[in-house]
Image (cartoon, coloured by chain):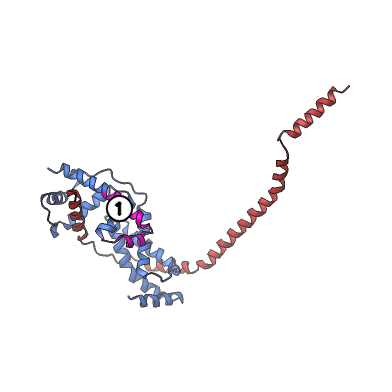
Amino acid sequence: MNPLDDQLDRLFRAAGQARLGPVPEPAYGVETRVLAAWRAGQGRDSGIWDVALLVRGLIVASVIMALSFLPALKSSSETTSPFADFVQLTDSTVSSDDAP
Amino acid sequence: MTDAEVTDCLARGRAGDEKAILELFHYMHPHVAKLVQANLPHRESAEDLIQQACVKVMSHLDQFSGKVPFLHWVSRIAVNTCLNQIRHEKRRPEVRLADLSEDEATVVEHLAAAPDELDASDHVASKELVDKLLLTLKPADRLLMRLMYLEGRQVDEIAKLTGWSKSLIKVRAFRARSVLRRSYGTLMKENP
């Protein structure tokens, strides 16, 4: 064994035997805080259901939004170029201007 | 308090008996305090942290399934509260001989001079020296070294307390031990 490891082990063993300070008594007012936390924890059931309901609502809303965008996406994919309408309009204008 | 008494207290607590909840609190408080004090030495906010851990336990009491002993469950919450507290602490780059008190320097000398165990009179200084050496580690590694070497906990137990996997604990322990060896080696080189 590495001599440093041996010394470290002995150091840890000695440190582990050092007595810790006395355990402090609960501070004034802690009991009240603890009871309040317990009551809050008990009443959390309804809160969790509220959150679950909200999440479900958000999911449904996202699905509806996605479905409403579908037709728009479909029509835009049918168009070959975003400038197609503009080019078509220009063509027709030029051709009508050239006409005798 | 036996497991049966804890179960009884929990049942009474669920029925709305505040006295039972306070009994549970007074039962777990010394245990939480010991854990926090052991893992956060020389810290003024230890008392706040003990309260924080107790409040966290009580606010999640309805989630205690009873599959593990109550104090194990409490310990896990207390250790995680400590971890959250120290997560962002900075580590010290190194420890030099000049940083040590006279007693701590004597411990280094004793360790180097003879292969014997240290005397009881050196225990407190040893603890302080270890605290200084541990400051060179990352906070999570520091907590792991305390649990493993100062409290003598096994890998399984640490895994349950921290929620880390056994392999992660072993890797962390190996790495932390290497850093400690290096820090301690620096002290030894400076030791005349």
Q: Position of residue B156 (x, y in %)?
A: 33, 62
Left/right placement of residue A74 relative to residue A44 reads right
**Viewer-proximal residue among B171 and A100:** B171
Q: Residue furthest front?
A: A1
Q: Position of residue A5 (x, y in %)?
A: 20, 51
Q: Quadrant of residue B152?
A: bottom left
Left or right: B133, with B67 as reference point? left
Residue sitting at the far right: A100
Q: Main secondary structure of the magenta part?
A: helix
Residue at x-position 79% and y-position 28%:
A91
Q: Position of residue B72 (x, y in %)?
A: 35, 67
**Which image quarter holds the C terminus of chain B?**
top left
The residue located at (33%, 55%) in the rendering is B169
Q: What amino acid type should be assigned to the residue bearing mark 1?
A: Ala
Question: In this picture, is A2 found above or below A45?
Answer: above
Residue at point 28%, 58% (across, down):
B148
Chain at numbered mark 1: B
| B128 horizontally vs A50: left or right | left
- Can you tell which chain is drawn red? A
Q: Which residue range is magenta in the image?
A: B151-177
Q: Residue at x 37, y 49 (%)?
A: B88
**Chain letter, colour blue:** B
Which image quarter holds the N terminus of chain B? Answer: bottom left
Count of number-bearing discs? 1
* Residue at mark 1: B173
